């Protein structure tokens, strides 16, 4: 595809539900990042993949958050037992090197 | 810990005016600095990337400068247009010596250009 694609665009979850957010990076991009953007704030780093290897997960807020990229392409961010403070826009970015290319994000609302 | 601050938080200008957005960061050990644009409900669009060894980058009506030693960057927009209205985000890639090129973002400047 032409850019980074994320799905779904919007997700409403009841508190306690598990959710899975998908990211299709630009073909050939080795690096993949997940960020969390709360309302009125800048994005905050969650985790980083180089191909299929998760090299940095220091930004994941709790053990309820899990990310994978099993074949070095598509990535999934999973949030277990969602809580209201998880409500945010989740952004995925891929990169061939220095510049980062972002998807449109998934807006998660936990009710 | 690297922190990025953007001033002002919001700015409203009449069409045609030149304007400057400011970004400051606390640790000068960075690989690069990037400026992004974010439209409501959309992802981020990269505008300019300045490597740590560079002083400025230009693209069309946009010019970004970097003074790494003082921890500052500015984004200059010439002859502003209503279509420039968006949130502008500044981000740095800190040099931690690790493999991650993660971005540390400021909270953004919300720009409104009035027709």
Image (cartoon, rainbow, N blue to C red):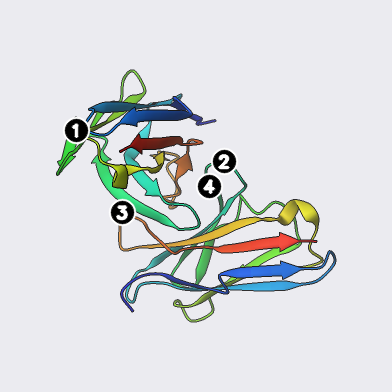
- Residue at far right of view: A16
- Residue at far bottom of view: A71
Contact between marks 4 and 2 (CB within 8 A): the answer is yes
> In the rendered image, which residue does mark 4 sit on?
A43
**Residues at marks 1 and 2 on the same chain:** no
> In the rendered image, which residue does mark 1 sit on?
B78
- Measure how far apart labels 2 and 3 are at the Cα level: 21 Å
> In the rendered image, which residue does mark 3 sit on?
A99
**Residues at marks 2 and 3 on the same chain:** yes
For disc 3, the neighbor class at 10 Å (few under 14, some 14 to 19, many from 20) is some
Chain ID at mark 4 = A
User: Dot 3: what SS?
Assistant: loop
Q: Is residue B48 left or right of residue A74?
A: left
Foreground tag (3 vs 4) = 4
Q: Quadrant of residue A25?
A: bottom left
Foreground tag (4 vs 1) = 1
Foreground tag (1 vs 3) = 1
Chain ID at mark 3 = A
- Measure how far apart labels 3 and 4 are at the Cα level: 16 Å
- Residue shown at the point (31%, 74%) measured from the top left: A2
Chain ID at mark 2 = A
Residue A29 screen position, x and y as percent: 34, 69
């Amino acid at each position: 595809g032409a850019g980074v694609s994320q799905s779904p665009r919007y997700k409403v979850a009841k508190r306690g539900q598990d959710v899975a957010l998908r990211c299709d990076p630009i073909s050939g991009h080795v690096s993949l990042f997940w960020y969390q953007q709360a309302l009125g704030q800048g994005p905050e780093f969650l985790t980083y993949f180089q191909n299929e290897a998760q090299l940095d997960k220091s930004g994941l807020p709790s053990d309820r958050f899990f990310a994978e990229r099993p074949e070095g392409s598509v990535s999934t961010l999973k949030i277990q037992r969602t809580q209201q403070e998880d409500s945010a826009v989740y952004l995925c970015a891929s990169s061939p090197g220095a510049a980062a290319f972002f998807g449109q994000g998934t807006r998660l609302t936990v009710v | 810990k690297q922190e990025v601050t953007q001033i002002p938080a919001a700015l409203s200008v009449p069409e045609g005016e030149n304007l400057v957005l400011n970004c400051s960061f606390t640790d000068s050990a960075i690989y690069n600095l990037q400026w992004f644009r974010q439209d409501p409900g959309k992802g981020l669009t990269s505008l300019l990337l300045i490597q740590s060894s560079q002083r400025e980058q230009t693209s069309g009506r946009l010019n970004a400068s970097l003074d790494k030693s003082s921890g500052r960057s500015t984004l200059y927009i010439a002859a502003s247009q209503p279509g420039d209205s968006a949130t502008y985000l500044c981000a740095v890639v800190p040099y931690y010596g690790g493999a991650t090129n993660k971005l540390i973002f400021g909270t953004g400047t919300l720009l409104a250009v009035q027709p």
